[in-house]
Image (spheres, grey):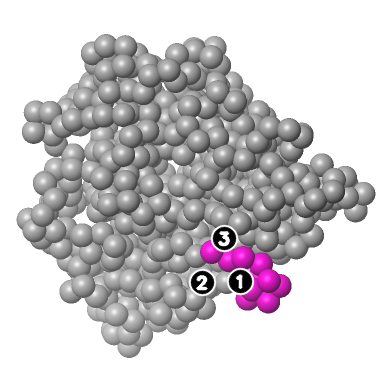
Amino acid sequence: MLQRSSLTALWPLQAGFAERTARTRPQQAYLALGLIAGLVLILCLYLQQASQVNSTHYDIVEVQRKQARLQRLNSIHLANYAYEHSIVKMNERAQAAGYRPTLGGLRYALLPDIGPGAQTLAAAGAPAPSLATEWEELDGGLSYRFTLRPDVNFHDGTEFNAAAVCRNFERWYSFTPAMRGDGSSTMFKQVFRAFKDDAKNSNYDGCTADGPLEVTIGLKMRLTGFLQALTLPAFAISSPAALKAGTADVLDQTFSANKVSKYGLHPVGTGPFTFTEAAPGGVTMTANPDYWGEKGTITTLKFRTFEQPETRFAALEDGTLDGFDPVTPGNYDLLIKNGKQVLQRDPFSVMYLGINQAIPVLQDLKVRQAIASAVDKATLAGNYFIAGTAPTGQFIPPKLSGFNNAVAGIPYDKAKAKSLLDASSYAGEELKFYYPTNAARTYLPQPEKVYAQIAKELTSIGFNIKPVPIPWSDGYVTAVTGEGDHALSLMGWNGSYADPDNFVGPLFGSPNAELGMDDPQLVSKITRARSMPNGPDRDAAYDSINKQLAETVPAVPIAFPISALALSDRVLSYPLSPVLNEVFNQVKLAPEPAG
């Protein structure tokens, strides 16, 4: 038996925050964060570094299981992202046009608040109030003024105000290389392009507190998707007092083999859940009794990590979990046959094969074209992703205006691939093919199988492929996004907000070590397009970008994966988000049985 006001979920992506819950009895929720789950976001919270905890919770004795059931009467077992965003928060329908996940109770965003964001997107896609109640665009889009919600406190009791917002923005802008890695995975760089030590190339032009609850953020160049970008968990507002007390910019702690700060082990925001504890294998959050918004019915959230899909399924089956995310093709049918709820999100991510042009032979266009021609995308999408996943020749999803039906990409043609390779400069050089293990991402649920299929296809036309498997939690992302000898790599991108720049900008908008490319013309096109007003001219600009990407093959887009999560029958309502921004104060649980 499980407690009504607890919720348990398994979460493998970068997740957000959960929601709050009711009062009466001690209640717990066990959230099983799948493989790379919510720990990544929680611990990377404001440090923007990827970390993951691997743990197999399924190996517990039956006595422990019975005790857990008694402690969690009518609890929910879920597997999702739960972090919420910042000042700007996307709602479900608006996100259907774009996204990415969070852990569910701390909530980040423009004004990340381990609670709601400063702003939300209404059903039609327009911003709706959250931590920011009003806003206006000034100077032709070169600045935005926000009116902040009054009477909001951080979890530590300190006041949420304009000064706190500016303290956070200035901190992100001033991140040192140690705090941001190479910057390629830091959302601040993806939105503002550069940090303080490269100010001339940064689009950030300062944050000004115009009053206790009035703040203005300046830009050097118009950014059409700026308000949408502020919904990102990376822009959630932390308590300045907690940042100082936790020496947030000093990475002197270790968690799951990653260097973090004291603050990173205990973040403080404004959301419906407060951070309770982070330990290897799990994270616990508790409902915030002083939360200003809807509190929901969950009092305690417990996220746990599982290494294998089989253990996640077993834990859901025996009542240890209320849900897990993501569902893999291997357990999809099993879940349905066993009467479990399986909810599918609209596709808003892209899985791709990275090609590193820092490897000399991969600078040859014919070699890259041969790679693209050798990959049977339809077979990959049909065999290793959830049914309905569509193969693709471009990086911008169909739901966004930048999608171009005319761009089919390079079709699968084994004979042509071999002909291209024979006509190229390739002379049998060994190509190291990096791929992750012990991971199930929403955009890559079965990486080992996808690698095996692609490697087989490339080898069959004459490539000399050397496999380089790296456990996701042992630094896979760092290995393939930093300078190194990776020739090929499996990666993906989860959309974070509904703007085409969120897809092509992070991947191709500036030189990066993942792809080793330096294409000033492409960078210039992307920079121009992101600042253009929405309309036909902007659509045409992204059409041109799509065509150039298809012609130059800096990477091979494989599919727009459909992701899904599994829920127990205790979960009556679970609002889905294509961008994985699903918050637990909106989850509805079955009523507690009488007696």
The structure residue drawn at horizontal position 73% and vertical position 39%, both measured from the top left corner, is 28
Question: Residue beneath label 3, please?
Answer: 565
> Secondary structure beneath disc 1?
helix
Range shown magenta: 332-343
The structure residue drawn at horizontal position 74% and vertical position 38%, both measured from the top left corner, is 27
Mark before the other along the chain sequence, 2 or 1: 1
Question: Residue beneath label 1, please?
Answer: 332
The relative height of residue 351 versus residue 199 in the rendered view (above or below) is below
Q: Is residue 417 magenta?
A: no
Q: Is residue 341 magenta?
A: yes
- The reply, left or right, for residue 33 in relation to residue 292 is right
What type is the residue that disc 2 sits on? Ile
Residue placed most toward the observer, 44 or 299: 299
> Secondary structure beneath disc 2?
loop
Q: Measuring from the top left, give residue 106's x and y in whole percent.
A: 52, 33
- The reply, left or right, for residue 172 in relation to residue 319 is left
- Which residue is the extreme one toward the right? 63
What type is the residue that disc 3 sits on? Leu
Mark before the other along the chain sequence, 1 or 3: 1
Q: Measuring from the top left, give residue 158's x and y in whole percent.
A: 49, 13
Q: Measuring from the top left, give residue 461's x and y in whole percent.
A: 40, 81
The structure residue drawn at horizontal position 47% and vertical position 32%, both measured from the top left corner, is 293
Question: Which quarter of the picture shows residue 406?
Answer: bottom left
The relative height of residue 496 versus residue 279 in the rendered view (above or below) is below
Question: Residue beneath label 2, please?
Answer: 386
Question: Which quarter of the picture shows residue 544?
Answer: bottom left
